[in-house]
Image: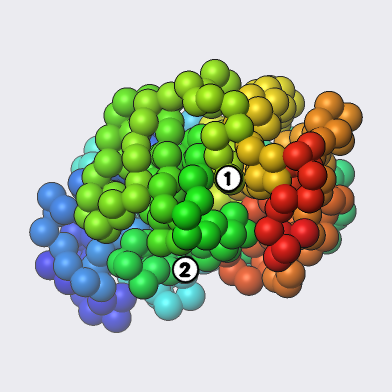
Amino acid sequence: MTDHAEGPAAEGVAARRVALEALARVEDDGAYANLALGPVLDASGLEGRDRGLVTDLVYGTIRRQRALDHLVDRFLTDAPPPAARRALRLGAYQVAYRDDIPPYAAVSATVGATPKRFRGLVNAVLRRVAAAPVAFPDEATELSFPDWMLERLEADLGGERARAALRSMNEPATVHTRADGYVQDLASQWVVEAVGARPGEVVLDLCAAPGGKATGIAGSADLVVAADLQAPRVGLIVANAARLGAAGVAPLVADALHPPFRPGCADRVLLDAPCSGLGVLRRRPDARWRVDAAAPERLAALQRRMVDAAVDLLRPGGVLVYSVCTFTAVETLGVDDHVRAHHRDLVALAPPQSPWEPWGRGALLLPQAAGTDGMALFRYRRGDGGDQGPPQDS
């Protein structure tokens, strides 16, 4: 069954039903949207354009959840059951944010995909949503982010930059494929470039799963030890390295807080540390509703400890690259403050150029700058062995 907005509404029911199934797995089962959607699509029998529609409906409905609830709740007297709430959000997303789908088609197809006992409610409410003007009580509701997230980023980035970043992350992510066939956002590819690995070098990637950066680095270095804490995640590194033919990647189960390597063994260390993930919310739409307000401070404490452990692994003149896919000050500038205070043997290296922007001694890549994930990056050379670092790293 295909999905054409201009055709009979019944033609769109199958796609909406699949979207509702995926949303149920995220909301009822706690599944991550980026992991739940693929299996649901594969089992659906939908192809091509229909799969793309379902992907946008699921991701868009989750991204805009707070805004959609506001649009719907104006016409509800009681909280609806979860299955009805999902259908209302799905229909409201199409009415408010999909200009290519006529409201009558969006309402009809969504009602057709809704469990029968809720169809009357969903039909009545969605028709009122379609007829009413779109208005929001505040900016956080309109942008559809938790209050704390907007407030935190406005404080750290400045109001307009923060709002532009959030608006950018409400748009679908662009798919980028490397020359070797691996799908990876440009921001992550640029982190690989910033590592600057060369032939003959040993590189440690301390938080490597699923292996995208490690396999990218392997195109330049002789050996990339790709470590991660959990065995199933290391299994992803093994699978990706095998599929890409990255023979120079050595996957390993290891704790970045207690790395099982001798001091001074690495020419370069990449610490792509666990973080609040506020820079990747466009491709992980449900993360905005999972991350709590205390996460940046909690994770910054972990990041500082990981940096401490990573420094000892560098040879004299070796390079440490610290990156996080977020832009809170505590997880970026705060970690660099820790490095400045506790690792005087580390010399900050020049940050990458545009579309990166200066961020303290490092660089910040905002999602609106080039339509990528958001990222922060700091590079250091260990200078306690004399000026042994490669010239282009200085």
Q: Residue at x 65, y 28 (%)?
A: 312
Mark 1 and mark 2 residues within 8 Å of each other at the beta carbon: no
Check the image and name the residue furthest to the top: 258
Residue 274, position in %: x, y? Answer: 57, 34
Residue 325, position in %: x, y? Answer: 61, 47
Q: Secondary structure at mark 2?
A: loop
* Mark 1 vs mark 2: in front: 1
- Which label sits on residue 174? 2
Residue 50, position in %: x, y? Answer: 24, 68
Q: Residue at x 17, y 67 (%)?
A: 47
Describe residue 84's horizontal placement relative to residue 140 as left or right: left
Q: State the quadrant of the C terminus.
A: bottom right
Callout 2: 10 Å neighbours few (<14), some, many (20+)?
Answer: some
Check the image and name the residue furthest to the bottom: 6
Residue denoted by label 1: 267
Say whether residue 140 is visible: no
Describe residue 225's horizontal placement relative to residue 377 as left or right: left
Q: State the quadrant of the N terminus.
A: bottom left
Say which amino acid is labelled 1: Asp
Q: Secondary structure at mark 1?
A: strand
Q: Nearer the viewer, residue 106 or 269?
A: 269
Residue 186, position in %: x, y? Answer: 52, 65
Q: Return the disc, 1 or 2, that comes first in the chain's sequence.
A: 2
Colour pattern of the rendering = rainbow
Q: Residue at x 78, y 64 (%)?
A: 357
Describe residue 237's horizontal placement relative to residue 89 as left or right: left
Say which amino acid is labelled 2: Thr
* Distance Cα–Cα, label 1 vs label 2: 33 Å
Q: Nearer the viewer, residue 179 or 153?
A: 179
Q: Nearer the viewer, residue 240 or 286?
A: 240
- Against 329, residue 374 (above or below) is below
